[in-house]
Amino acid sequence: MSHDNRYLKDNFAPIDVETTALEPRVSGTLPPELSGRLLRIGPNPLAPDPATHHWFLGNGMVHGIRLEQGKALWYRSRLVRDDDVTSRKGWPETPGPRPEHQLGSGVVNTHVISHAGKTLALVEAGNLPMELDDELETQCRTNFDGTLPAGFSAHPKLDPDTGELHATVYGVGVEHLQYVVVDRAGRVRRSVNVPTPGHPMVHDCAITQNYFILFDFPVLLDPAVLEAGYQMPYRWHPEYGARLGLLPRDGQAEDVVWHEVKPCFVFHPMNSYEDSDGRVVLDVCRYPKLFDQDMRGTLEADPTLDRWIIDPKGGPVKEERISAHGEEFPRIDERRIGKPYRYGYTGCLRPEGPPLGGLRKHDLSAGTSVAHVAAPGRSFMEPVFVPASPDAGEDEGWVMAYVHDANANRCDVVVLDAQNFAAPPIATIHLPVRVPYGFHGSWVPDAR
């Protein structure tokens, strides 16, 4: 096994210290409507073994920018205090429950959201969310007041009409997929156990007005991977097949109707909805395979932006390609989750791997797209759309993203005009440190 691990090099490499930078320098003009925090999270392993380290498994570090009325007030980075972090740093142990099947030290490193007035750092596969304060310090593990049956998901979907979170839970110690609904107050009000033939990795989910969509793809728990010395015990098994499950949102496991698609893997859907004929339209970043040869990351093949059209009454799934570009980290105006929508935003993958060479805005009604291209030496991270106001049009607002500048070995945060997407940023916040390539984040607006 090679010890040359690209996920510990360059801007994948962890950083050594937490940072607080007050009033970071700003070029351009920040829109005064942007009052809140732009948060993101990713792995920052404290003591990785290069021979076995997998990108997905490092200790979490959360990053945040605080904006208020046209000013940047602070940037902060903080380690998420799992048991390994507190032990190595000599810090007090993080309070809160520890499930029987917690993975390792309870690492949380994949997404950060706000729900029920709390900032939550999330991960999948069995570990509990971590609650953070407004300045990103870890407060506690949470099982939602004892209502969470097992672990949680990295990617719950917020229904913009009900304010509830919908999620798929899987992981070690769970013999099924679990559909979980978290109410507006932050307590689980519903869970449904859905059997599957194997133990698939399920990173995300999707919702429509009437359905919760389950993913059952051929990346499966495989003990032989651990025996071979790798840390992430999942592998590509194309013979398993691939399918999508439509579960009525008030239904039970026996009500799921499964629809087969060509073998593939999906980390992230862009959105899903029901069309005027009652068919489910699901747009996804689709990998032709995953964890077949590259057992430490995602470099085997680029995902393409594809559309699946599913007739709940039966028949084959219609599969279409929206874009043949390598694209990941799809985001939309989250007021359109589960509803018909027009615009979506993605990161443009470079041929050599995950760092994003730019961002792309898709007009799905017109069938067109426009790119915002990174300058030499600069790499984008996941875009986040922020509407200009609660009643603004679907693309009336800004797209924000962290950007690594390899020339200076530090990070900027850029603000793009969503309606003039290819133009230079209207504002750039210059951070004094770099932010390693990571996963996901959110805009958390101040209470209006």
Image (cartoon, rainbow, N blue to C red):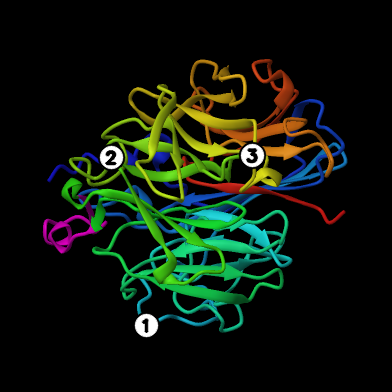
Relative height, residue 279 to residue 30 (above, below): below
Q: Which residue is mark 1?
A: 100
Q: Secondary structure at mark 1?
A: loop
Q: Type of residue at label 1?
A: Glu
Disc number placed over residue 340 in the picture, else none: 3
Asked if the magenta segment contains residue 408, the reply would be no
Q: Nearer the viewer, residue 327 or 163?
A: 163
> Which of the two labelled residues, at mark 2 and mark 1, occupies the earlier sequence position?
1
Q: Position of residue 404 (x, y in %)?
A: 53, 31
For the residues labelled 2 and 1, say whether their Cβ atoms are less than 8 Å apart.
Answer: no
Q: Residues within 10 Å of mark 2 (few under 14, many from 20)?
A: few
Instruction: Between label 3 and label 1, give the one nearer the viewer.
Output: 3
Residue 434 seen in the figure: no
Residue 274 seen in the figure: yes
Q: Quadrant of residue 161?
A: bottom right
Q: Secondary structure at mark 2?
A: loop
Q: Type of residue at label 2?
A: Lys
Asked if the magenta segment contains residue 223, the reply would be yes
Q: Nearer the viewer, residue 416 or 391?
A: 391
Q: Which residue is mark 2?
A: 262
> Is 310 on the left or on the right of 337, as rendered?
left
